[in-house]
Image (cartoon, helix red, strand yellow):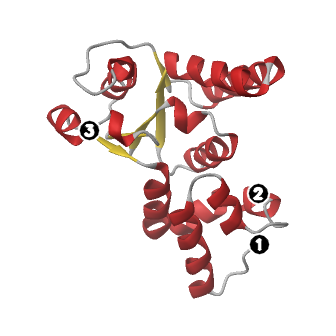
Amino acid sequence: MILCLDACALYPVALREMLVSYAKAGGFTPVWSARAAEEWARAAGAKQGEAAEMLARGDAARMRAAFPEGEIEASGDFDGPDPADAHVVAAALAGGAEAILTFNLRDFPPRALRPLGLVALHPDAFLAGALKRDGTRLRAALAEIERAAAGRGMRAFLKRAGLPRFGKAWEREGDQTGESPVR
């Protein structure tokens, strides 16, 4: 599955680290627009200062190295609520994506994406669904993150990251499998 990552799926560090880990494990193939990477770096700088922007640019370079075909220079028109999102749709189409991963579902309505063969997915729904269909790989990919979250618990960590459904599913699935919450 090829997913186009919107800037809002790249900027929160926790979510980006989860997505990159899962993609590196073969869970999906990420693509993103060059503009989304720039938006991510600028957002980090605006919210956390120049050092955070430089770190974001370094993280973007590491993503480009890990996924050499991932960053796509693309532009186009998009008949959606926010014309500024046209670069995301153009990158999704150029990269052969099946879906756009975004917190901003209202900016990518089904009526505008369906004719293009795309859908928009919320990261919480995507990761909760991935846990059901590819749980072993996803859990292995996130094992290091789970260990880092051990102090407050993975469910609380995921909820704070804006992924409450995924957190609940993570906890529930761990209980059903008898797996320790932290390996």
Q: CA distance from mark 1 to mark 3?
A: 38 Å
- CB atoms of marks 2 and 1 within 8 Å: no
Q: Residue at x 50, y 16 (%)?
A: 35
Is residue 74 at least partly visible in the picture? yes
Image position, residue 85 (x, y; %): 38, 23
Three-letter code, disc 3: Pro
- The residue lying toward the viewer, choosing from 80 and 58, is 80
- The residue lying toward the viewer, choosing from 105 and 133, is 105
Three-letter code, disc 1: Val
User: Callout 1 environment at 10 Å: few (<14), some (14 to 19), or many (20+)?
Assistant: some
- Asked where in the image residue 43 lies, by quadrant, the reply is top right
Mark 1 and mark 3 lie on one chain; the one further toward the N terminus is 3
Q: Residue at x 57, y 80 (%)?
A: 172
In the displayed orientation, state which residue is furthest to the left: 115
Q: Is residue 32 above or below residue 76?
A: below
Task: State the mark number for residue 182.
Answer: 1
Of circles 2 and 3, the one toward us is 3
Q: Is residue 103 above or below residue 39?
A: below
> Would you name the residue on which mark 3 appears?
109
Mark 2 and mark 1 lie on one chain; the one further toward the N terminus is 2
User: Callout 3 environment at 10 Å: few (<14), some (14 to 19), or many (20+)?
Assistant: some
> Would you name the residue on which mark 2 appears?
144
Q: Residue at x 71, y 27 (%)?
A: 47
Q: Is residue 101 above or below residue 55?
A: below
Q: Mark 1: which secondary structure?
A: loop
